[in-house]
Image (cartoon, rainbow, N blue to C red):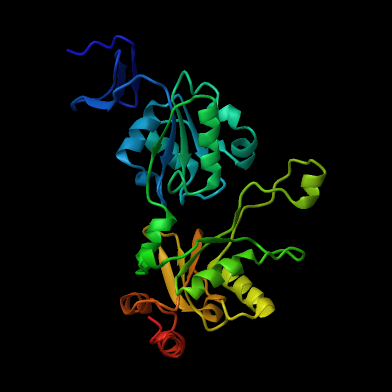
Amino acid sequence: MLSCGLGAEKRQGSIFCRTQNSLYHFITGANIQIIRGTTTTMLYLIGLGLADETDVTVKGLELIKKAERVYLEAYTSILLVDIANLEAYYGRPIIVADREMVESASDEILAGADTSDVAFLVVGDPFGATTHTDLVLRARELQIPVQSVHNASIMSAIGATGLQLYNFGQTVSMVFFTDTWKPSSFYDRLKENQQIGLHSLLLLDIKVKEQSLANLARGRKIYEPPRFMTVAECASQMLETEEERGEGVCGPQNLAVGVARVGAWNQKMAAGTLKQLSGIDLGAPLHSLVLLGKKTHYLERDFVRDFAVKQDVFDTVWSELYEGKQ
């Protein structure tokens, strides 16, 4: 019989038992599971997947249940369910970590991680954003051990479009344009991908707990309503930039694939020209867009064609701009 020499704790029908060398997890009526062969405390970066609370891995869920504190990074991406769903499923209260906390007050997250386990939850995969790499570097400076639990992200799940992952070039971000700020650096990355015939994945802007320039300048903690860029908005901004740059990178007749809520039961996809996609409605967030490379394989074409906005238009553009470029 196992003796919990370093104490035991019961949570949500589970018992976590510490011995000198191991942490054991008991589930009523089940066998002993060894979670890890050490009692060293850690910062855990845990990927949650793309859609809802059930996308977490078994390993990730076990670590969440035993953590002293659980944070949810809530500004580089979002799940498609409320935080209450996560708390009910994980059996743990969750602290929402906004941009300000993660980027400017990370010490609050890391505080005590040298004496108790802290879980930092990330939508998708833990290393899908550079912010999370920075958090790991800060933890290392404090000599806090870090372990990551990976999960699906849009970078891999975009394969659901039928486009082959090894035919993708650089991934770029598309931010919301304003009247006075319309950055076009994304255009140069698209051009580089186009020159070698590769697809380009565009990750679309989200605005969560953002301040207006006026409120930011005055130091007022007043936040704008959340905004999530759509495929139509992205396509429109690409066409606007093409009109200005005029290098034929993302013109009205370039083929693209718009996706929404990838990984969810109601995910949606549409293929067509950028002009067509600039007027499409794919519903609720999150959205992404893929600009097809000229070396699109015939198998990719056949897969994508099934969800074309208009197959006759798709076929015409394919024959004029893509046929024979493989």
For residue 128, above or below residue 19: below
Relative horizontal placement of residue 233, taking residue 309 as reference (left or right): right
Quarter of the image where the C terminus is located: bottom left
For residue 103, above or below residue 37: below
Quarter of the image where the N terminus is located: top left
Relative horizontal placement of residue 210, taking residue 287 as reference (left or right): right
The residue drawn where x is 28% and y is 12% is 4
User: Residue 111 sits in which quadrant?
Assistant: top right
For residue 322, above or below residue 221: below
Relative horizontal placement of residue 22, taking residue 195 as reference (left or right): left
Nearer to us in this view, 98 or 35: 35
Say if residue 73 shows up in the picture: no
Residue 265 coordinates in the image, percent (x, y): 36, 59
The residue drawn where x is 50% and y is 49% is 78
Nearer to us in this view, 145 or 116: 145
Nearer to us in this view, 10 or 3: 3
Residue 219 coordinates in the image, percent (x, y): 79, 40
Residue 40 coordinates in the image, percent (x, y): 39, 20
The residue drawn where x is 66% and y is 52% is 225
User: Residue 33 sits in which quadrant?
Assistant: top left
Residue 204 coordinates in the image, percent (x, y): 55, 61
Say if residue 290 shows up in the picture: yes
Figure disc tally: 0
